[in-house]
Amino acid sequence: MIELSAGQGPRGRDAAAIPDFDAVAFGPFSLRSRLLEKDGLPVRLGSRATDILRLLVSRAGEVVPKNEILGYAWSGLSVEEVSLRVHVAELRKVLGDGKDGARYITNIPGRGYCFVAPVRRGGRAEVATPASRVPERAAPPPSLPRRLDRMVGREDAVAELAARLLRDRFVTLRGPGGIGKTTVATALAHEMCDSFDGNVHFLEFGPLKDGALVASTVAAALGLVVHHEDPSASIVNFLRGRRLLLVLDSCEHVIEEVARLAENIYREAPGIVILATSRESLLVEGEQIFELVSLPGPPQGTRLSAGEVLAYPAVRLFVDRAVAAGHRDDITDEDAEVLARICGKLDGIALAIELAAARVGLYGLREMAALLDNRLQLEWRGRRTAPPRQQTLGATLDWSFGLIGESERIVFQRLAVFAGHFTLRGAIAVAAGAEMAEDRVVEALEQLVVKSLVSTQPDGASRRYRLLDATRAYALQKLADGGQLAQIAHRHALYVQCTLEAGMRDKEGSDHASRLQESASLLADARAALQWAYANDDGAGLRVPLAGSCTRLFVELNLLNEARIWSDRALAMLDEADRGGAWELELQSTLGHALMFTERNSEQAEAALRRGLEIAEALSDHANTFRLLSRLNMFYRRTGRYRHLVPTALHAERIARVIGDTAGIAGSKALLGVSYHLAGDQAAAQAHLDQGLRDDAALRGTQPGHFAYSRTPQIPLARVLWLRGFPDRALECIRPLVGAFGAA
C-alpha cells in the first residue's frame, strides 16, 4: 500500500494538477481536456482511468512510476497497487490494446507504466519508444473460467474487493442470484493473478450436488491424492506455508461444508486468501462480507437526456447487450425515458437485464417495455418456500421462454440435464430423437446461444456450452412438468456412459494429458448421471455399466472415495448376466484399488483384486490380468506379505510374454526385481532390475493408460546395489534422476 499526503504526489507535484496539453491523437483516438473520442465518437471512460491516461499520454515514451500515477489519480488517499492495475486494465480494454497488433500501454516490471503508441500533437507524430521490451503477460491458470470481454458497472467493485481481500484475507461476495457474483469473482481472479504469481484456484461448486464432496473437490483441484474419506486435514496441511488465492464460487447449496473447510483454512493457513461467492453468509470466523448490490439505474419519473441516462451502469449494460444482439447503437433522448423504465423494472439484476436486452433487436424498446408490463413480474420479496433459484429470476425466465420457438423450447429443456459444460456432440446425443432431427438441434442450439439462454466459450478448435445455474433450474422444472425428465435423463446417463467407455477403449497410445482433461470435463455429469440412475427405476439397466465407466474416471482423478462407493453399490446390484463379465471385472479392480488406499489394505481389498483377477483370466483378458497382478503385488508390499511377491511377479512376467509387448516385459522385470529385493534375494533382484533397466526406454515411453505403466527401476536398483556393497554404482545409477528432479 502506498500512502500519500493530501494533495501531494510522491515527487512533490500537486497531485490534483493533471498535466494540461493541447488535443492529442493516437491511433483512431483523440484526447482533449477530459474527453476521449474514437473516430470522432465519444468513448465512455471512468474519471480515474481518464486521469491515468492523461498523465501517461503527457509523458509518452517515458516510464511513469506507479507511485506517481497513484498520487495523481488518488490524491490524498491510501490505496493498494491493485487499484491501479484494475484501472489500467480498463484503459487497455477501451483502447483495444493488444488487438490487431495495437499497443498503447505497457508495464515495465518493478518500475511503472509507459505509453508506447505514436502520439500526434499539432499535426506532428511523436513515436514513443519504450525503455525496454516487456514480455507478454503470462497466461492465466487453466482453472480460471474465461472472463467476459466487457464487464459493465463493476470495475469499482473489483478494485474495492481486491483491496479488501489483501487486507482481510477472507471475504464472501454476497448477493441474490443473477446479480453478477461469478462475473466479479472471475474478473477479480484474473486481475490478481500477478499478485499471487499465478497461484489462483477457482472452484465452481454450482454443479456439485452432494455437500460431502466439497473437500474431495478442493483436494482434487489442488492436485492432492485423497487417501481417506475426509481430506480436510490434508488440505489444510498442504496449504500451510503456501500463498495463493482460493475462489469458492456458488457456495449456497453446499454452505455448511464450505463454511467448515474455509474456516479451518483461514485459521491454519495464514498465507491463503479466500474469496467465496454465495447468496448467504458463511457465518464463520474471519469472514468479512462484501455485499454486491444491484447495478445502479436512473431514478423513475424523471426526464433525462440520452447522455444522462447512459451514465447509469444498468442502462449501459442494457444498451451494450442490446447493440451486441443487433439493436441500433444511436440512443436518442426519446429512448431515454423508456430505457429508464425498463431498467427500473429489471431491478438492476444483471442476468435479467441481459435476457431482456437480447430481444430488443426483435421487438424494439417500446414493445419491450410493454412486454415487461404484461408478461413479466419481478418480485424480489417472493415466497421463502419457493425454489431458491426461482425466487428472483423465475418470472424473467418465464417471459424469455415464451419468446422462443417450439424447437428451441424443446432443446432448451433437454439441455438442462447437463450438470456442467457440454459439447455439440453431447447436445445432439441428448436432445435429438425421432421427433427432433440432429440439424434442428444444431439450429436450435445456435438460436439459444444468440438469445443468451445458453452461454458458450471456445475450447481449442471447438466450443463448449453451458446453461447458467438459474436458467438450468428453470428449464429442468419445465422438463419435469412436461413429463420428459426420465426419458431425457436416461439419454444423458447413456451418453455419459458411452463417452467414458469409448475413452477407456482408446487409452492405449493416446495422449494421457489431453484424454484426462476431456474425461475430467464430464465429472459433474458423471456424478449427476449416477445419482439419477440409482435413484430412479428408469435407470436400473444403466447402473452397472455407468458405474463401471464412471469409477475408472474417479480413479484417474484420484477421487478414490467416490470410486469405492459407486463400485461397491454397483457390485451389490449385479445380476446373473453381469457376473463374471467385463463390467464386474472393471468394478472389482476399481474397488480393490480404491480400498487399498482408503481402507488401509483391508481383506476386502484383497478379495476384490483376487476376484477381478479370476474374471480376467477366465476372459483371457491379458492386459487386465497384468494390471491386477501388479495391484496385488502392491497390496502384498504394503501389507508386508513378502512371500507372495515373487509368485505374483513371475505370473505377471508370463502374461507380459504372452502379450508380447516390449514395455510390458520391461515392466515385469522391474516388478520381479522389486519383489526379489523385498523378499531378500538381492542377487536375483539386481539381475532382473538390470535387465529391466536395459529396456528402460520402452518402459519410460508408456502412458498411464498402458497396462504395464510403472515407475523407473533406477531407484530400487540403487538400493540393491548399495546393499550388495556397490555404493559407487548405486550413486551412478541414481545421479541422472537427481539431475532430472533438480531441473524440474
Image: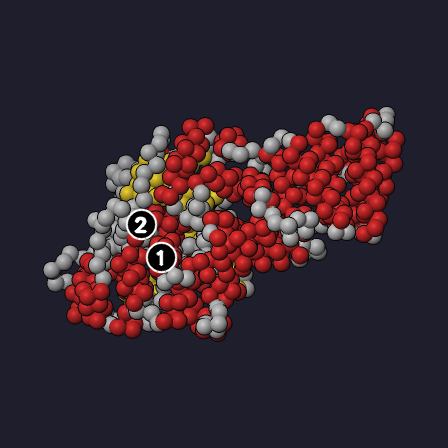
Quadrant housing residue 350: bottom left
Q: Which of the labelled discs sits on residue 27, or is there none?
A: none
Q: Which residue is mark 1?
A: 477
Q: CA distance from mark 2 to mark 1?
A: 10 Å
Task: Tell which circle, 2 or 1, labels the residue nearer the N-terminal end.
Answer: 2
Which residue corresponds to the image point at 22% horizontal and 65% vertical from the top-left?
Answer: 375
Please state which of residues 575 and 306 is positioned toward the viewer in this rendering. Answer: 575
Residue 72, placed above or below residue 352: above
Residue at screen point 50% across, 61% down: 491
| Rendered position, 299 above or below 25 | above
Q: Amino acid at mark 1?
A: Gln
The residue sitting at 66% across, 32% down in the picture is 603
614 displayed left or right of 159: right
Give left or right: position of 21 versus 571: left
Residue 593, horizontal then vertical, whole percent: 65, 39
In the displayed structure, 544 sits above or below 671; it is below
- Image quadrant containing the N terminus: top left
Q: Would you say 606 lies left or right of 164 here?
A: right
Which residue in the structure is indicated by mark 2? Answer: 387
**Residue 187, image x, y percentages:** 39, 50
> CB atoms at circles 2 and 1 under 8 Å apart?
yes
Residue 51 appears in the rendering: no
Q: Amino acid at mark 2?
A: Pro
Element on which disc 1 rests: helix
Instruction: Please give the name of the residue rendered at 26% of the width and 73% of the height, measured from the top-left corner.
Output: 363
Q: Position of residue 663 (x, y in %)?
A: 79, 49
The quadrant in which the C terminus is found is top right
Q: Position of residue 354 (x, y in %)?
A: 31, 61
